[in-house]
Amino acid sequence: MTDTQSFEFQTEVKQLLHLMIHSLYSNPEIFLRELVSNASDAADKLRYEALTDDALLADDPELRIEIEADREQRTVTIRDNGIGMSRDEVIENLGTIARSGTRSFLEKLSGDEQKDSGLIGQFGVGFYSAFIVADRVTVNTRRAGSDEAVRWTSDGEGRYTLAEIDSRPRGTEIVLHLREDQDEFLEPMRLRHIVKRYSDHIALPVLMRKADDEGKPTDEWETVNTASALWTRPKSEISDEEYTEFYKTVAHDFEDPLRWAHNRVEGNQDYTSLIYLPKRAPFDLWDRESNHGLKLYVKRVFIMDDAKQLLPTWLRFVRGIVDSNDLPLNVSRELLQSSRVVDKLRAAITKRSLDLIESLAKDDAETFLEFWKTFGAVIKEGIVEDQTQQERIAGLARWHSTHGDDLTTLDEYIERMPEGQDKIYYLTAETLATAKSSPHIEGFAKKNVEVLLLTDRVDERVVGHLTEYKDKQLVSVARGEADLKSVVADPNEEAEQARLETLYKDTIERLGKSLDDDVESVRLSQRLTESPACLVVGEHAMSRHLEQLLKQAGEAGVPGSKPILEVNPSHPVLEHLKGLSADEDFDDLARMLYEQAVLAEGSQLTDPAAFVKRLNRWVFRDAAASNDASSQGAA
Ligand code: ADP
Ligand code: MG
């Protein structure tokens, strides 16, 4: 019975504990929210298990949470009669952090406590927040259906102990031995206040001892919260603050949500949903496999966290709950995957989420822009993955463009299109700087034809799927012939073009031979006005940028198709090339023309050192020549 064993915390726990205690001391009261929320989860889990085994609940069916303070002992106790924990579960839950992504989260921490304290909120503080106010924590617990009871204790310094104890009532009791300066939490009024503030929406009753006339606790208990699931109450009776606190528990977020939608649907489908848009990205936003999805309830009974089936992956930042009356109580993850009810539910919630995002865009453009900068690249995945919502998402999206520094919508782009233009032009590139100074857009800029500059990683896939928007084709300015003529026709220009074609016919042919290994062909460009050359691909070929991305990602078997070199007929280099008789010089300059086009699109040269040598030979040619001349003269 008194056999006590000592264990060391997992390294990650130690790191997290340290960080938590040091970054959250300014807001210590949240420990209560976390522990009450865990108690409520424990009740949810028990109710769920009791669906298939009612004996688990039968011995003590009134689920509740109790909180009390003891002035003499200087302790605060939070007690529940929920699922409890077995010895193994205690080790797993209170000795490690099992959550996926923990390591990568911790790697992101800078060591600067101020900065890191912001991140800890995104990670979710949980049970260990007890150590913000306590220098010793004791957990007594017995799992439903088992006789074994366990005691866990720790001072949060790196180790914890486990001991078997005499059996106790089902559930978990957490005793916090308060730190010296945390006496305020011995005040029942203070505790009530915190419960009201953070945990009023908890569906279970939270009980505290009634006080007598002198304010001393009595043996009678009373409920101090509203004790009905928030989403079941009429919207008009729920304050913004209650919605906000509910969000924080559901999303494990420190910050207030940006916006929410609470809907009750009856008829064809029967469900309640309460969904939220966060302000800030969760630490694992870019992990498509991360835990996400909504909390699922069936007829008020908690079924599971992170029900992925209720939301498409491209809405993985949306948080909230769904309470369905159509699903069976014994629904499992497997069943969710093949349920028509769930498919309909997901479609409805996807629409609702888009409504919510659109309403934000309409009501508050500035906030929406911030939101878009945070989540836009994720939402755009929907253009690729969700045919039915493609046009809606594309309409919501904000893009960089040559029009100005502000992001634009496709509709705004279309409104600005000059007469004659019937396509939407874009360029994909690694960075905005590369895109803005790209040779490919010169001709378009000169003719005032706007080009969208797409620099998010997902954009290549986006334009692969979004070939049209409102009957306007999306066309890359780095693919095929630039059909600028069709946009802004100019007969003088056409005549000039024909003249140049004839003039440089031989030079172009010679260039083609010289660069045969690297390019598919060489031609005169209509899209260049300043740069001497650029690389483009054929009408149906994979874009150069996508090829680059795939190679970076280590994708095997990327078809290395050869690009087309376009040369600017109004640039002096052509005239110069035409005049070069020495093959050696011609080949050298041709190669440089190709290499600088590679660099301008943001790609890598296969032999950069050779390029630098060539460059220097040409740049310092005159200097070298005059040096030669003067040394000859001296001789
Ligand atoms: P989270 O609640 O996000 O899972 P916590 O750190 O708050 O993370 O809790 C860790 C785990 O400890 C919980 O997932 C749960 O399994 C267990 N746990 C914590 N408190 C209780 C409790 N009162 N009853 C049963 N299990 C609990
Ligand atoms: Mg928790």
Image (cartoon, grey):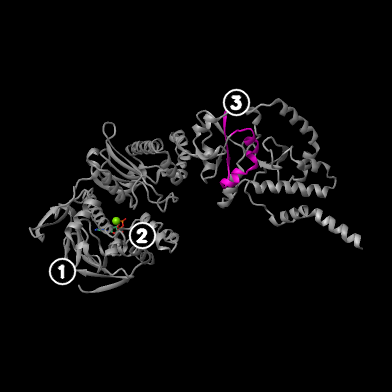
Q: CA distance from mark 1 to mark 3?
A: 85 Å
Residue placed at 74% from the left, 45% from the top?
Answer: 515
Can residue 141 be spotted in the picture?
no
Q: Is residue 415 above or below residue 248?
A: above
Marks 2/3: CA–CA distance:
60 Å
Residue 507, given in percent of the width and then of the height, sits at: 79, 39
Give how far across and how far down residue 76 sits, in percent: 20, 63
Q: Residues within 10 Å of mark 3 (few under 14, many from 20)?
A: few
Q: Are marks 1 and 3 in contact (CB under 8 Å)?
A: no
| Residue corresponding to mark 1 | 72
Horizontal arrangement in the rendering, residue 397 relative to residue 247 (left or right) = right
Residue designated by label 2 = 98
Q: Label 3: which residue? A: 420
Q: Which residues are magenta?
A: 422-449
Please tell me whether mark 2 or mark 3 is closer to you in this view.
Answer: 3
**Horizontally, is 471 left or right of 577 in the view?**
left
Specify few, some or many for label 2: CA neighbours under 10 Å numbering under 14, 14-19, or 20 or more.
Answer: few
